[in-house]
Amino acid sequence: MPVKEKDNKVVKSEFYKEVKGHKRVAESQFILSLYKNPDLFFEYDIDPSDISDISWRFYYGVLKDLMTTKKLKVVDMIAVEEYVQSKSDKLQEFYNENGGYETIATGSRIIEDGNVDVFYSEIQRYKVILKLLDMGYPIQENWNKYAKMNLDELSDYLEGQLNSAFLDADFGEDKVVDILTGIEDMVKRADSGIDRGLPLTSQLMNGIQNGMSLGNITMLAANSGVGKTFLTLNQLLPTHVDLEERLMIIANEEDRAKWQREIITWQINNLQKDGNFEKERFSQGKFSKEEKTQIAKAVKWLRDKMSDGLIQFVNLNDFSMNKTIKLIKKYSTGLGIKYFIVDTLKSDNDVGSKISDNSWLQLQQNMVKLYNAIKPTNRNCHVWVTYQMSKNPKGKYLSQNDLGISKNVADVVSSLLLIRLLSETEKGEGAGSLKVKNEDGRTVALNEDEDYFVVFWDKNRQGSTSEQAVLKVDRGRNKVKDIGKVRISPEYS
């Protein structure tokens, strides 16, 4: 009997070494991918202690220091060699014993960094398997089954096994705590404004929504051409510039030049004395002397106020939620960006994506993935998403139902804003005119020659949904003015 136990320990040890060998291969593939494409570094959270092989842990540590401490954008032989030479003789000796930079150069030539997701997942999978072996789980006996499973499949299978074991068990006690536990900390957080998030530029809108709290999604929906991007720019840009809070714009419909024109137009008409510039002039060209002066002032102001990459921009040629989430992970970690704009949310259309009648379901699942990436227990970021309504509203009241068959995309958002232009009959003082009250409580007559937005909140976790905001808008000049509040009920439509 003792001999048999000894034999079993030897077998387990050999199997453990085999699994660890598989993990080392995945580690080498993952780390070589990062060296080949350093832009991938900030997309993955990995603790150096999770890297089993001491040599690859060393190479990862070098890369981490170069990317995070020295903030290099290009990692080449010169950068690595200079870094190593600045360290101790013992570390330099270890570097040379492991092949020096030639190990990186040779491996990078043969590795496909496009598979980095797979390599990362394999590290996590083997990490879990090794832990299970340490805890005595019978992994070896079922290795033919487990070896074919990816990380998600392994997790689902083992979770199912555990759930099955506990299915009929009677859990005697749930955790009960005093409801006042931590109440002072909650009050301090609320008083500090940490939970509030950045304000919207419009005091009227912000008074209803109460800011853009971190760990949440705000969705702004409207029909095509109404002005989703226009209102987004007017509500977010001034706040981020004034508070010097970094922002990233992830666009898939408008290129950088379009956003630059929008920003210049906004600056001229909102901040320059006697500024008067129509954005359509960018399409017409041949600027007047006065226009050139205004544009030059705007560009200088923007460069002064938005230096050091305050506003980052990327235009996705092919949209996918996976790309979007990778960007959020990378820049929230690498640059500390906490606020993002996705303009406009749509179904994945990158290579490999399948467009089908179930695209609405993909949208819904993508929004869940987005929320899981930015929620308080993960990256704790705020994302402002614009979305195009799929049909014309049937009435004057807008709700989540006006998103059409894909209305469930808004299930995970904290604030759902829907906007439309006021009709001619809603202006003036006629029978169908809206009763808009300003901040003093006085009824305001709406000019029939002006354009107005009415903003509905169908979801608003930090405020009410019973009132709507009315804004005077000049979409050609990127100007927005608060007018007042109105109450439009579903029965009104």
Image (cartoon, grey):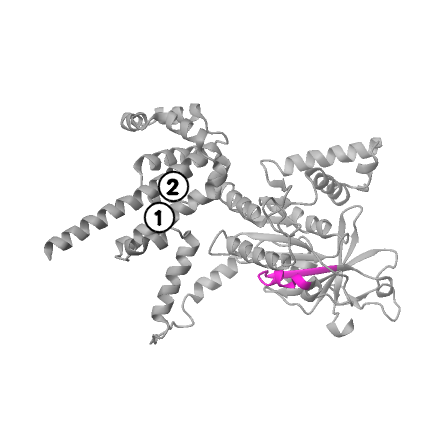
Corner quadrant of residue 50: top left
Q: Amino acid at mark 1?
A: Tyr
Looking at the rendering, the stretch of residues picked out in magenta corresponds to 405-419
Looking at the image, which residue is at 41% across and 37% down?
Answer: 29
Depth order, front residue of 226/391: 391
Callout 2–callout 1 Cβ contact below 8 Å: yes
Magenta region includes residue 413? yes
Q: Position of residue 370 (x, y in %)?
A: 55, 54
Image quarter of the N terminus: bottom left
Q: Position of residue 354 (x, y in %)?
A: 61, 51
Q: Position of residue 101 (x, y in %)?
A: 38, 26
Q: Secondary structure at mark 2?
A: helix
Q: Which residue is mark 2?
A: 26
In the picture, the disc for residue 126 is 1
Looking at the image, is 7 positioned above or below residue 62? below
Horizontal side of 10 relative to 391 (left or right) equals left
